[in-house]
Image (cartoon, rainbow, N blue to C red):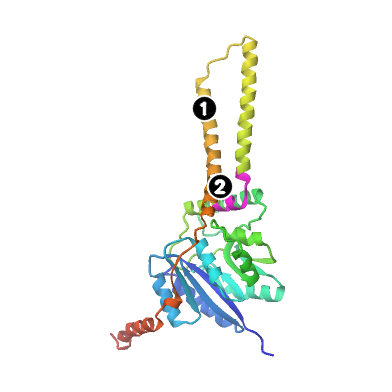
Amino acid sequence: MEKKLHTITVIVPCYNEEEALPFFYKEICRVAETLNETVFELLFVDDGSKDGTLEILRKLAAFDKRVRYVSFSRNFGKESAMYAGLENATGDYVAIMDADLQDPPALLPQMLEAIEKEGYDAVGTKRSTRKGEPVIRSMFARMFYRIINKISKVQMIPGARDFILMKRNVKEAILSMPEYNRYTKGIFNWVGFKVKWLAYDNIQRVAGKTKWSFWKLFKYSIECIVAFSTAPLAIASFFGFLFCFLAVVGIIIVVIRDLAGIQSAAGWPSMICITLFVGGVQLFCTGILGTYLSKTYLESKRRPMYLTSETEKDLDKEKILNEIRDYNKPRQDGN
């Protein structure tokens, strides 16, 4: 009986990855050749790139039948790109990885073996070190994981990457959560299943520049906290109760002092400091409430997470191939 071939859909979110794509394509093709009983499908998601990323994807799709792509009408963010990839993936297994080779494709055979021979439903990856990363960013990242794992019921894996290989049932479970404000790492942990984690040393980008500034990472961490914990609301409630209690105690003390004939000393500086402190706490708590309310508002709109402007089905492959041939002719003529 002939053994059934398994298909792996490799989802690759891309945003201005013109420089890194040739390196990634060459490496993923090399890995694909080592897996003889596995059919690869490369699904690139162009997240509204402003460089030549889309043009490269068009040429790859015209040249290689394994390549598919989805191009957004604008930049919707990596979370939307990953969701679009999962929606359009057709493989028995689905992998998500970055195009900058910080997620090494060479790990795919080991990840596939863990699923097929060790009985895991998914294999995730995490960095064992943060070597090469800015010190301040590493410090805040470690602080974030300590905080989120204390205030959330869903445990986040420190150093976890978006590089994941999963069975189709895990993919369907993630897609069953169509929330607008997404944090895929948290959703992956929330759905459960039997997961194996592989650790590897931090790898620098093969080309191009990172799209994640400190401010973007900070906002992304807020998304995680709001999506998987209501602890900030409890903190706001605690502050409200605390200052109400202190106010009542203060009133009682003032009344007792007045009945005892004790004159209260003038303390304008301390009073101003206390007023500013209490006002700051109130604004802080209002900000927390506003953040949760804004997320609820965005969810209630039920806007699509992305809009597609083009896929490989819209591509005139013959035209692209002719352009490639015309481009190569002068080289063949020695010009």
Q: Single out the residue that lies furthest toward the left.
A: 335
* Chain part drawn in magenta: 223-232
Left or right of 257? Residue 315 is left
Image label count: 2
Any part of residue 167 in sight:
no
SS state under label 1: helix
Residue 250's label in the rendered image is: none
Q: Single out the residue that lies furthest toward the front.
A: 301
Q: Quadrant of residue 15?
A: bottom left
Residue 273's label in the rendered image is: 1
Q: Residue at x 65, y 70 (%)?
A: 169
Q: Residue at x 61, y 43 (%)?
A: 233
- Mark 1: give few (<14), some (14-19) or many (20+) Cα within 10 Å: few
Task: Please tell me which of labels 2 and 1 falls first in the chain.
Answer: 1
Question: Residue 306 in the image: x percent, y percent?
Answer: 48, 63
User: Nearest the camera: 126 or 89?
Assistant: 89
Q: Is residue 227 magenta?
A: yes
Question: Residue 242 in the image: x percent, y percent?
Answer: 63, 32
SS assignment for the magenta stretch, majority: helix
Q: Are dots 2 and 1 in contact, CB under 8 Å? A: no
Name which residue type carries label 2: Tyr
Indicate whether 335 appears above or below 56. Answer: below
Q: Quadrant of residue 263?
A: top right
Quarter the N terminus occupies = bottom right
SS state under label 2: helix
Indicate whether 261 appears above or below 63. Answer: above
User: Nearest the camera: 93 or 329?
Assistant: 93
Q: Name the residue carrying label 2.
A: 292
Q: Is residue 198 magenta?
A: no
